[in-house]
Amino acid sequence: MIQLRSMVIVADNSGAQIIQCINVPGGSGKRYGQLGDIIVGTVKKASPRKLVKKHEVVKAVVVRQRKEFRRADGSYIRFDDNAVVVLAEGKLPKGGRVFGPIAKEVKDKGFDEIAQMAAELL
């Protein structure tokens, strides 16, 4: 569950390292972003000489979350951290690599490019 002001780790090599969530698009009642949801955030920490700079406003997709997520088959999945992948345009990632495992819900929501780059799909 990613909500406003949540600090999340970036799981790609776009240059951003930490993003703070500033909006969860999806209507007036949408409070939390879960696996596969797009969030809007601002970059709080970034690597030098990379694509994404500090203070930029970016869109990102949630690929890992600490809060357990109930799947359709009744099982639950939970990760050790909250992580996102920065998006360029549409559903394409800005970086060229994705670090760590990602949930299969990300692929189910149409982010096939991110799923292909991931080391492990849980």
Image (cartoon, rainbow, N blue to C red):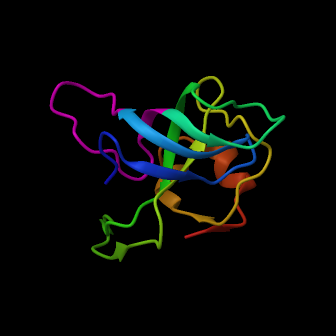
Q: Is residue 22 magenta?
A: no
Left or right: 82 in relation to 51 = left
Left or right: 36 in relation to 121 = left
Using the rendered view, name the quadrant where residue 74 is placed. Answer: bottom left
Q: Is residue 66 above or below residue 11?
A: below
Residue at (46% x, 59% y) in the render: 82
Q: Residue furthest right?
A: 49
- Residue nearer the viewer, 32 or 17: 17
- Residue nearer the viewer, 74 or 26: 26
Q: Which segment is the magenta one?
A: 23-41
- Residue nearer the viewer, 113 or 7: 7
Main SS of the magenta segment? loop
Residue at (47% x, 73% y) in the render: 80
Using the rendered view, name the quadrant where residue 28 is placed. Answer: top left
Q: Position of residue 118 (x, y in %)?
A: 70, 59
Left or right: 99 in relation to 32 = right
Q: Residue furthest bottom?
A: 75
Residue at (63% x, 23% y) in the render: 89
Left or right: 121 in relation to 62 = right
Q: Position of residue 65 (x, y in %)?
A: 42, 61
Q: Is residue 35 magenta?
A: yes
Q: Position of residue 17 (x, y in %)?
A: 63, 48
- Residue nearer the viewer, 111 or 82: 82
Q: Position of residue 1 (x, y in %)?
A: 31, 54
